């Protein structure tokens, strides 16, 4: 039973344009959501997070939106850069503990 | 600060053998979690340790076990290896297990079972 779903296995975007990565979840107990980026041969790197009490969080070129009623979150990258090409994982956790539930990941390719 | 380190980086084992993987967290981090990444299942939570105690456990068979030492270093052990155990094993550390939040991942140990 996949509690966190990333339905797009891959996304290709032109440099300078917006990249939108989507994530859906089913567990209403999830209270905190995170995005990680992963390059080949490296571990995932934390990108940005959002608490369920918010609907938007920004950090530079990265913005995460949360729609609790739809159990949906998205990551916007503006403008996209070739160095953003990586696998992006959506993750969620309940209030306590570090047990992260990850989505399957979306491969982002930014073309120059 | 040095990041999370994992040893060894690559490992080849035969079915039926056992293996031990090691993780050193970021200095000052007291919580260590382990994840398995496979192409079919993605990243799956194995277990979390804090103060030498297992706090959370994922849905893995008892062949998968772990421990944490007083210096926060952690090891995970897989006994009676199966072909399906071939995966990237990732360790992550964080300062406080009581707060959800960012975890810092190591580069992983690539285990191949033949």
Image (cartoon, coloured by chain):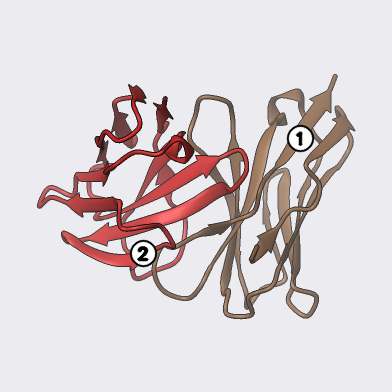
Chain colours: A brown, B red
Q: Position of residue B56 (x, y in %)?
A: 34, 67
Which residue is the site of mark 1?
A: A108
Q: Secondary structure at mark 2?
A: strand
Task: Report the residue at 39% width, 55% height from top.
Answer: B46
Task: Report the residue at 41% width, 74% height from top.
Answer: A96
Q: Position of residue A59 (x, y in %)?
A: 65, 50
Mark identifier at residue B57:
2
Label 2 CA crowd tier, 10 Å (few <14, some 14–19, many 20+): some
Count of numbered badges drawn on the protein = 2
Give the farthest residue toward the front. B16
Q: Secondary structure at mark 1?
A: strand
Give the farthest residue toward the top. A112
Give the farthest residue toward the left. B70
Is the C terminus of chain A in the top left, top right, bottom left or bottom right quadrant? top right
* In this view, the mark in front (1 or 2): 2
Q: Marks 1/2: CA distance?
A: 31 Å
Q: Is residue B41 left or right of residue A71?
A: left
The subunit letter for the residue under badge 1 reads A
Query: Quarter-wise, where is residue A17 in the image?
Result: top right
In the depicted structure, whether residue B84 falls above or below residue B14 = below
The subunit letter for the residue under badge 2 reads B
User: Are tags 1 and 2 found on a single chain?
Assistant: no
Task: Report the residue at 51% width, 42% height from top.
Answer: B37
Q: Is residue B2 left or right of residue A6?
A: left
Label 1 CA crowd tier, 10 Å (few <14, some 14–19, many 20+): many
Q: Is residue B61 left or right of residue A81?
A: left
Is the N terminus of chain A in the top left, top right, bottom left or bottom right quadrant? bottom right
Q: Position of residue B76 (x, y in %)?
A: 26, 45
Task: Report the residue at 26% width, 59% height from top.
Answer: B49
Mark 1 near mark 2, Cβ–Cβ under 8 Å?
Answer: no
Query: Quarter-wise, where is residue B85 in the image?
Result: top left
């Amino acid at each position: 039973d996949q509690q966190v779903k990333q339905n797009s296995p891959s996304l290709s975007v032109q440099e300078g344009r917006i990249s939108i990565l989507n994530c859906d979840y089913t567990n209403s107990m999830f209270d905190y959501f995170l995005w990680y980026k992963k390059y080949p041969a490296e571990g995932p790197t934390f990108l940005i997070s959002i608490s369920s009490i918010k609907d938007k969080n920004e950090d530079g070129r990265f913005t995460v939106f949360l729609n609790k009623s739809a159990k949906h979150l998205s990551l916007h990258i503006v403008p996209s850069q070739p160095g953003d090409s990586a696998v992006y994982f959506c993750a969620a956790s309940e209030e306590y503990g570090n047990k992260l539930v990850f989505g399957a990941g979306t491969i982002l390719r930014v073309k120059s | 600060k040095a990041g999370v380190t994992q040893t060894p980086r690559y490992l080849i084992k035969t079915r039926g053998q056992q293996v031990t993987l090691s993780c050193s967290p970021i200095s000052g981090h007291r919580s260590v979690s382990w994840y398995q990444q496979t192409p079919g299942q993605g990243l799956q939570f194995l277990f979390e340790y804090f103060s030498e105690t297992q706090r959370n456990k994922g849905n893995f068979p008892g062949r998968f076990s772990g421990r944490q030492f007083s210096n926060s270093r952690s090891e995970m052990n897989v006994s009676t290896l199966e072909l399906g155990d071939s995966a990237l094993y990732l360790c992550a550390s964080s300062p406080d297990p009581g707060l959800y939040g960012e975890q810092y991942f190591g580069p992983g140990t690539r285990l191949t079972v033949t």
